[in-house]
Image (cartoon, rainbow, N blue to C red):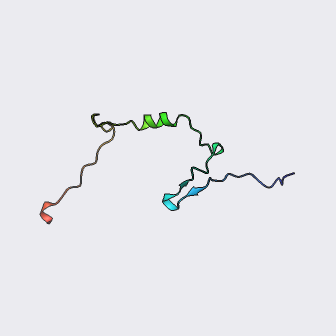
Amino acid sequence: MADPRDKAGASAPATLGEGCLARFDPEALSDEDGTEFPGAVELWGRLNPSVGADDPAMAAPADIETPAPPPTDRNSR
């Protein structure tokens, strides 16, 4: 019988790289890690619509204001 004080714990999958370049190793991931996502392609398409060369640019949302550029002092040169 297993030791009752030996508690189960989660562990992160193997990673590649270090620091801000660290990422999960795709070769080490499996279905046990929750990598199965059948709707990923559809979600990606909805969140990142492709923009062709002839498509008009999308406007910024109406509730977001673009900050004004800082004032310049033309006499300080």
- Residue 69 to residue 55: above or below: below
Q: Where is residue 71 in the image (x, y as percent from the top left)?
A: 20, 55
- Which is nearer the eye, 14 or 64? 14
Residue farthest toward the left in the current orientation of the protein:
75
Horizontally, is 8 left or right of 37 in the view?
Answer: right
Horizontally, is 19 left or right of 50 in the view?
Answer: right
Q: Where is residue 77 in the image (x, y as percent from the top left)?
A: 14, 66
Horizontally, is 37 left or right of 8 in the view?
Answer: left
- Name the residue rendered at 59%, 39% in the picture: 36
- How many marks the image carries: the answer is 0
Q: Where is residue 61 in the image (x, y as percent from the top left)?
A: 33, 37
- Residue 37 to residue 24: above or below: above
- Residue 70 to residue 47: above or below: below
Horizontally, is 11 left or right of 55 in the view?
Answer: right
Residue farthest toward the right in the current orientation of the protein:
1
Residue farthest toward the bottom in the current orientation of the protein:
77
Q: In which quarter of the image is residue 5?
A: bottom right
- Name the residue rendered at 51%, 61% in the picture: 19
- Name the residue rendered at 25%, 49% in the picture: 68
- Name the residue rendered at 59%, 43% in the picture: 35
Q: Quadrant of residue 64?
A: top left
Q: Where is residue 75 in the image (x, y as percent from the top left)?
A: 12, 63
- Which is nearer the eye, 16 or 27? 27
